[in-house]
Amino acid sequence: MITLKKEALFIGGTGTISMAITELLATRPEWHLTVLNRGSRKAELPEGVSELNVDINDEDAVRKALSGKHFETVCDFIGFVPAQVERDYRLFKGITNQYMYISSASAYNKLPADYRITEGTTLANPYWEYSRNKIACEEFLLKKYREEGYPVTIIRPSHTYDKRAVPLGVHGSKGSYSVLKRMMEGKPVIIHGDGTSLWTMTYNEDFAVGFVGLMGNPHAIGEAFQITCDETLTWNQIYQTVAKTLGVTLKPYYVASEFLAAAGPQYDFTGSLIGDKSNSVVFDNTKLKRAVPEFCPKIHFEEGIRRTITYVLAHPKLQVEDPEFDAWTDRVIAALEAAKKSV
């Protein structure tokens, strides 16, 4: 008996979120996945996944490459500004039954009126342009759904991580390894606020289960879904778990988010902290679980961070040092210590 596979197209497909989805989808016999990218991480694609090497920004070339094709689901993992989703609308209108857009939970209202976040929480973020662009993308796509029936599904991830990088709140532009190195050297590390605000970390393999369950799901069309772990942690717990996994004693140094934003504009803490991580949030995944009953996050932070730290420490290429951020951290701590003595 011949079984016709459902065709999926991913724009991107090898990032933190999308790689886990790509790997999971490759195990599903009912799906065939094509990844549209420029081939920079071709070797990492699982067996059975096809690749379409074309630049998504070359609209004419993409349209030519897609001629005669039709997809059950198309997902853009690298759409950040309205012009990109407008391009996708032109390219995929009429050739897909579902267009999935990766937005962001940072789009939710800051400060939130209620720490419990659902898909109905207002979208507004005056602190972060990244989030405002995501909101604008959502608004464009949902307008097309309301007016034309464009089959959009909105996905709002929060802090999703994988084995390649440790998720932390305060780090430099080169990633978080510099903070891990400080921990291992017995140096103090900066934690924003007093470390008691609530946060959620989601391992990408758990995220993938929720996402794949929404692919081709008729209950997902015209809807928005957040996909997060059900575990809620304080930032103190997050940093303590990282230190415990490293086998070191945590030396936290608490600094107000507003001070960090003013002292380190080059790191955009106004957006990433005040516009996101410094706010206490608890995500309610009830809507997702109704649509995808198999979604049940299994990888709690202690296990996920063990996997990540083990992998990072075993792969020197991921151990990217950041002397500039390291020196900045020392200056911030020294300045605040001097301020204490001067009062």
Image (cartoon, rainbow, N blue to C red):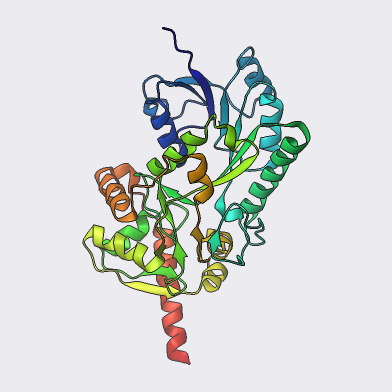
Residue 134, how many percent across, how many down?
64, 47
Residue 55, how many percent across, how many down?
58, 26
Quadrant containing the N terminus is top left
- Residue placed most toward the observer, 302 or 39: 302
- Residue placed most toward the observer, 147 or 56: 147
Query: Going 47% across and 73% down the picture, which residue do you hit?
Result: 193
Q: How many numbered discs?
A: 0
- Residue placed most toward the observer, 53 or 95: 95
Query: Going 46% across and 91% down the picture, which residue do you hit?
Result: 342
Q: Quadrant of residue 43?
A: top left
Residue 286, how many percent across, how many down?
50, 50
Residue 269 visible, this angle: yes
Q: Is residue 334 left or right of residue 311?
A: right
Residue 157 visible, this angle: no
Query: Going 64% across and 29% down the picture, which residue do you hit?
Result: 57
Against 220, is 171 above or below?
A: below
Residue 131, how many percent across, how many down?
62, 53
- Residue placed most toward the observer, 120 or 267: 120
Q: Is residue 36 left or right of residue 27?
A: right
Query: Going 67% across and 36% down the picture, which residue do you hit?
Result: 85
Against 151, is 200 above or below?
A: below
Q: Quadrant of residue 181?
A: bottom left
Q: Is residue 9 left or right of residue 232?
A: right
| Residue at the farthest top position | 1
Q: Quadrant of residue 184?
A: bottom left
